[in-house]
Image (cartoon, rainbow, N blue to C red):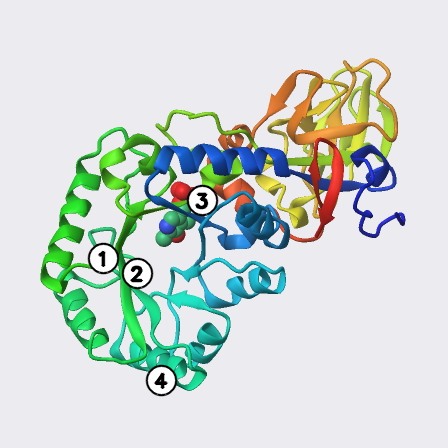
Amino acid sequence: MTANGPAAAGTSLAEATRALNAWFEIDLDALAANARVLRETAAPATVIAVVKANAYGHGIEVVGPALEAAGIERLAVIFLPEALPLREAGVTRPVLVLGHSFPDDAEVAVANDLTLTVDTPELAEAVSAAALRAGKAPVPVHIKVDSGMHRFGLMPAEVAALAAHVRTLEGVTLEAIWTHLANADHEDDSFTTHQDAVVAEAIRLAGPVPMRHIANTATTIRHPEFRYEGVRTGIGIYGALPDHTPNPGLRPVLSMKGRLARVFDVAPGEGVSYGLTWRAERPSRIALIPIGYADGYQRALSNRGEVLARGRRCPIVGRICMDHFLIDVTDVPGAATGDEAVLIGEQGGEAITAAEVAAHIDTINYEVLAGLNRRLPRLAHRAGVVEATC
Ligand SMILES: *Cc1c(COP(=O)(O)O)cnc(C)c1O
């Protein structure tokens, strides 16, 4: 491999990262195992793996094909353009678009076999016409119910009216009615039960459909009665969990790592990084990590949180910059330039999860993962052997 280019498939992670300042490791064995656990949990319901937001920051080009190989039947994204990298990566299974689309999207959707969630007669008509032109009629469409979260979707009477219209169109077939749950990760399930009843009402008005899907990861794990024909699992696929959700055996897929780029001593009273917001209270050894908020390691982590070096937890000191931050390695014997630092993941029996990072900055693991951007390379591996990069 070249110093900063993509690693060749078949090289070890150690070799592939030797000359990388920072990177993500995507554990394809963990991903496949999580897919298996969720499929077993949901069965006989179909698992629709949610790969929005670059597969929750994991890299959609590697995650999509790996999930298909692991037997996942369907995938879902929010917006149509997010689905195209899946097709470019060779994914052939149905891909559902969960968010808003325009009639102008119909052509591309049909050409790429993407299933749209339709919310207007105009969109349904455009999909129908595109399907007839492409000789693919009838193509499936889904309708989303606003069952009380009041985000995207239609009220039950509107669902029924649109379903009736869809049924008059030659080029489309209504495959599913679905909703999204507002309080799936709450201890109290009363609102989930209410939303389920609203969907039942929408279906009573609209007439039966082959598929209903309302459950996200939390509901899939916690409530067999809401799995219906399909479940949409996002965070669980990546081995992270919503609040109030027991772990059925899921393992984290992503690690975030960097190499100590400089290790140096600062005297008591000296400050580090922008604003000199941290000052040494003792003779201190400091290490520079070449990762910053431009990589999704949020500035709010300044002077909060920890990083693993030589298997020990080291406090973040000073501000997180766009491209760099510092940790205190005074208590890490032998810490040296080139050492691997773990921001998310395991080292020497210690582990830092996305949820732990989130807790330091008053957010959730979802935001930490989805916020990891594309500057750093992602090395997808099985048992430490690189299989693909993106
Ligand atoms: C993100 C999302 C999901 C997945 O939710 P998880 O809690 O990550 O399992 C399912 N459905 C919709 C509509 C979503 O936006």
Dots 4, 1 in contact, CB < 8 A: no
Q: Which residue corresponds to mark 4?
A: 129
Q: Which residue corresponds to mark 2?
A: 152
> What's under tag 3, amino acid-wise?
Gly
The first of marks 3 and 2 along the sequence is: 2
- Mark in the foreground, 3 or 1: 3
Q: Which residue corresponds to mark 1?
A: 146
Dots 3, 1 in contact, CB < 8 A: no
Find residue 225 and report its image quarter.
top left
Dots 2, 1 in contact, CB < 8 A: yes
Residue at 54 percent across and 29 percent down: it is: 251
> What's under tag 1, amino acid-wise?
Asp
- Mark in the foreground, 4 or 3: 4
Mark 1 nearby-residue class (10 Å; few <14, some 14–19, many ≥20): many
Q: Is residue 124 above or below residue 288?
A: below
> What's under tag 4, amino acid-wise?
Ala
What SS does tag 4 mark?
A: helix
**Quick one: 23 or 55, which is closer to the camera?**
55
The first of marks 2 and 4 along the sequence is: 4
Mark 4 nearby-residue class (10 Å; few <14, some 14–19, many ≥20): many
Number of marks in picture: 4
Dots 2, 4 in contact, CB < 8 A: no
Q: Which residue corresponds to mark 3?
A: 234
The first of marks 4 and 1 along the sequence is: 4
Q: Is mark 3 within 8 Å of ligand 1?
A: yes
Find residue 348 and report its image quarter.
top right
Residue at 41 percent across and 77 percent down: it is: 136
Residue 350 in the image: state x and y as whole percent: 64, 18
